[in-house]
Image (cartoon, grey):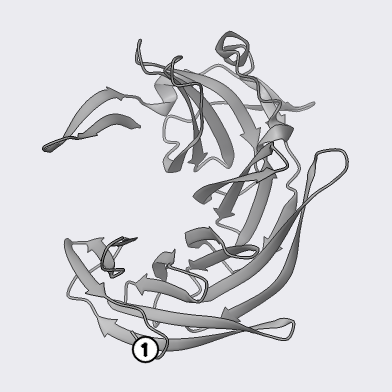
Amino acid sequence: MMLWKITSDANIQGQQLGSYILSGLGETTKHSKKENRSIQFDPQTRLMDVAICRPEASSSGTYVISTACSDSFFRVYAFDFITRKLSLCFNLHHGEHCILKLSQICLINDSVKNHFFITGAADGYIKVFNQNTCNYTSSISHLEGNILPQFVTPDLQLKSHQSGINALDAKSIADWIIGTAGDDNALSISVVHFELLASEHMRCTEVSKAQVKSAHASQITGLKILDGKTIVTVSIDQRINIWTWKSVGSDLVIDLSISKISLIPDIAHLEAWQNEVTKSWTLLVCGQGIESFTFVLNEENV
């Protein structure tokens, strides 16, 4: 894991704050996983995805970073910006499969803030976790002592794909839209409703869903939700597909709006951002090279 400080004054500059190896942080200390089992940090464990899940007060200079790992554990670290120390806080047992993708959302209802982790794993399941179930505390000294595995129950678990989930994105419209794509060449969309209960806990339920089983000719490696009706996917088949979706009663309907060919082989990732002035979108595709596309969305077409 490499941590960077990005400044964008007259020029954009990047400063590397540190570089860390998972096996070096966890060493090889064994911890109890179940009564008759134990776990050990495997030096071959890979960090599959990462997100800054909760920055502390700006004066403290401390950030909490969540990581998805190939050994099926979800790990949370505390990073001190001043000392540049990265400390392992939590080992969260996710399941028996490699976690491939990770996203994080923040919900604020009546001044109650809830952070949720959304993960996609090699078994094709989406899991949604409330950060409050991880016994979070802002005391870093307390966090550093809590490295034993914790077993957390997902607030929502959805079977979205036959195999691994390679791309995941979430966006708030009226409810939350969770889009996934994976090794089975399929595109899946789920509408998830979050409800604040009297106990100040959140309940999440799937309202509707839709899937395109053959969205591409090969595995999909990138997905971005642009707005309340448009999703973009990219695949190793070197196609960029722009999809539109709409609600028809209680069902979702997904239609292919446009498909473009990319010149980049082995597409591995997709990024998208919108120009606030012109309202145009830019797509950045990367693989064995980088390629960008710019377009404008309107009511009829792209």
Indicate left or right for 61 with 277 as reference. Answer: right
Number of marks in the rendered image = 1
> Can you give x and y, in whole percent of width and height, for residue 192 in the image?
68, 62
43 lies above or below 195: above
Percent x, y of residue 178: 58, 63
As helix, strand or loop, the secondary structure at mark 1 comes to loop
Up the image or down, 15 lies above or below 117; here it is above
Side of 154 where 210 appears, left or right = left
Q: Where is residue 80 in the image (x, y as percent from the top left)?
A: 41, 16
In which quadrant of the rendered view does residue 24 lie? top left
| Quadrant assignment, res 212 | bottom right
The C terminus: image quadrant: bottom left
Tell me the quarter of the image containing the N terminus: top left
Q: What residue type is labelled 1?
A: Asn
Q: Which residue lies furthest to the bottom in this view?
A: 300
Q: Which residue lies furthest to the right in this view?
A: 198
Q: Is residue 36 left or right of residue 107?
A: right
The residue closer to the viewer here, 268 or 278, is 278
Q: Image point 35% across, 72% down: which residue? A: 235
Q: Is residue 114 visible?
A: yes
Q: How crowded is mark 1: few (under 14 residues within 10 Å), some or many (20 or more)?
A: few
- Which of 4 and 144 lies nearest the eye of the viewer? 4
| Residue under label 1 | 301
Residue 95 appearing in the image: no
Q: Is residue 123 left or right of residue 182?
A: right
Q: Position of residue 222 (x, y in %)?
A: 39, 64
Q: In this view, does 225 lie above or below 148?
A: below
Q: Furthest-front residue in view?
A: 277
Q: In the image, what residue occupies the spot 57% across and 21% down?
A: 89
